[in-house]
Each structure stands twice: as structure tokens, then as C-alpha cells.
Amino acid sequence: MGKQSWKAGNMLYPVPAVMVSCQRAGERPNIITAAWAGTICSDPAMLSVSIRKERFSYGIIKETKEFVVNLVTKDLVYAADYCGVKSGRDVDKFAELKLTIQKMEHVNAPGILQSPVNLECIVKDIISLGSHDMFLAKIAGVTADDRYMDKSGKFHLNAAGLAAYSHGEYYELGNKIGTFGFSVKRKK
């Protein structure tokens, strides 16, 4: 078995495909798709999103210091791709894609009602990295779609058909192959 050596590059895949919604007061809301987003802390709950400075949403988020991360399902992949290639300078993405604006409780940025989970984020720091700036944000609130709650109150997010992005392609998450800690559990 051989391997090739390549120059340094981003090959950490798959990653979540998320739609980040934002809005300046008095202006129409916007959505940008981000594949460079991730959990960075559990207490307090925080995440990061990296965005190029020239993107329309960059200025909105930098100014308002808030945004909403909306998880993407297979039913939202078309919208996610569209929001990643079309600029909010030119297009009203909510209207064009027939997405429903969801008023959020903790931030003025809107959520996307069709998303199974919306994470309301308040920017705590912006780190300039080069081609992208990383927005470090505290998660101020979470909304979850009732359709994925069972009678005992357990949230079945994996039943939503979540999507991931890998090397230029979108994938629906598939079969469960283990659970946290299964490698060390006692065998019966």
C-alpha cells in the first residue's frame, strides 16, 4: 500500500454543512452556507464559524455580533448549496428558496424554520486567520423541531436526515456504526 505526499491543505472531511443566518436592523435577512463550523466548548456552549472577509454575511455578523446556525437535512441541501454560491447582495435567499423566517428568542438574527435545530449565537471574539476570519460564539439558545421528540422527551436528531459536506460533495448521514463508549463497554 502506497501513499502520496501533497502540499498542506484542508482535508478534514466530512464536516457539517450548516446555513448561517444573519440580519442587520432594517435590512432583509441573509443566509450563508458554511462548511467550516464546529463545536469548540461545552461549558459554556460555544461554536466557531469561519467566513471569508469578502462575503456579504461577514460584514453583517461582524457588525451585529450575532447569527444563527441552522442544521441542514437532505431536504435542505439544495437551499444550502444555493446559499453557498449566490450572494445576499443580489438575492433575497429566504424569498427565493421559500424558506420561512423563524423569530429567535435570544438574538435578532432570524432562524430557518425548516431546519431541525437552530443555534442562536452571540459573537465573543473574531480571530483573523488569513483567507477566513473565525467567529467564536457563545450559544445563547437552541430550538429543536418537535417532530424529532419522542414521548419520553428524547430528541432523535439523527432521524432528521442530516447532511454533511465532504470534498465538494453533500452526503446524507447513514447507518449508526457505534455509540459513544461502545469500545470499552463490558460484553454481556
Image (cartoon, grey):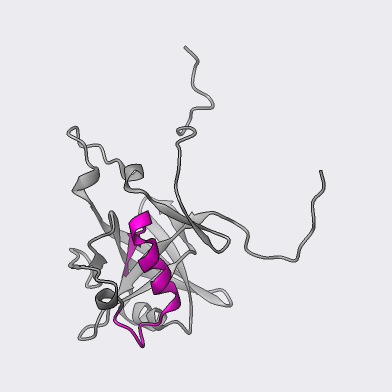
| Residue 67 sits inside the magenta stretch | yes
Answer above or below: position of 10 versus 87.
Answer: above
Answer above or below: position of 49 versus 161.
Answer: below
Q: Which residue occupies the extreme top position in the image?
A: 188
Res 82 quadrant in image: bottom left
Return the residue nearer the eye: 52 or 127.
52
Q: Which residues are magenta?
A: 66-92
Res 23 quadrant in image: bottom left
Question: Quick check: can you spot residue 43?
Answer: yes
Question: Quick check: can you spot residue 66?
Answer: no
The residue positioned 59% from the left and 56% from the top of the image is 12
Return the residue nearer the eye: 171 or 156.
171
The residue positioned 48% from the left and 30% from the top of the image is 181
Relative to residue 2, is residue 45 drawn left or right? left
Count of labels in the image: 0
Residue 111's spot in the image, x, y percent?
25, 66
Quarter of the N terminus within the rendering: top right
Residue 60's spot in the image, x, y percent?
34, 81
The residue positioned 22% from the left and 73% from the top of the image is 108
Residue 129's spot in the image, x, y percent?
56, 74
| Residue 115 sits inside the magenta stretch | no
Residue 135's spot in the image, x, y percent?
43, 70
The residue positioned 26% from the left and 65% from the top of the image is 112
